[in-house]
Amino acid sequence: MSRTASLAILGSTAFILTLVLAGCGQAAAREPSVGQPSPQRRLPPKDRFPTLDAYLAFLEKRAQLGGSWYRQVQPGLYRRETGGLKREGGEARDRLYTREELAWMFGYDEAGR
């Protein structure tokens, strides 16, 4: 085989490899098919949990692995617990939320009931 023929085969192999690799990138960047969930889109809490109470219970349980949750400090009044996370000012925020505020934040109607 001549040197020119070898270079032509090598060049065409590299070209095909380039097309294959470019095709893989396009397939990954494509939108998911209709009816298939996208990993970038998450359902809001109201679509995953039937009530605000169920979502708050989930947050509390998940907080064992790390994360924030809302502790009821008085009937209808909640404080966000962060597991000791301190803000830049040095203090954790001590803001209180009403049940209605939490329901609005997470998309529930009628205070999540």
Image: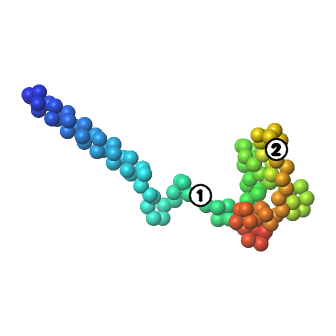
Q: Quadrant of the N terminus?
A: top left
Q: Which mark is residue 92?
A: 2
Q: Which secondary structure, mark 2?
A: loop
Q: Where is residue 45? Give x, y as percent.
A: 67, 61
Residue type (three-letter) at the residue carrying disc 1: Arg
Q: Quadrant of residue 44?
A: bottom right
- Crowding at dot 2, Cα within 10 Å, few <14 / some 14-19 / many 20+, comes out as some
Q: From the viewer's perspective, is residue 61 above or below residue 52?
A: above
Residue 49 visible = no
- Residue receiving disc 1: 42
Q: Where is residue 60? Give x, y as percent.
A: 77, 51
**Residue farthest toward the bottom in the current orientation of the protein:** 110
Q: Which mark is residue 6?
A: none
Q: Which secondary structure, mark 1?
A: loop
**Which of the two marks, 1 or 2, is nearer to us in this view?**
2
Residue 22 visible = yes
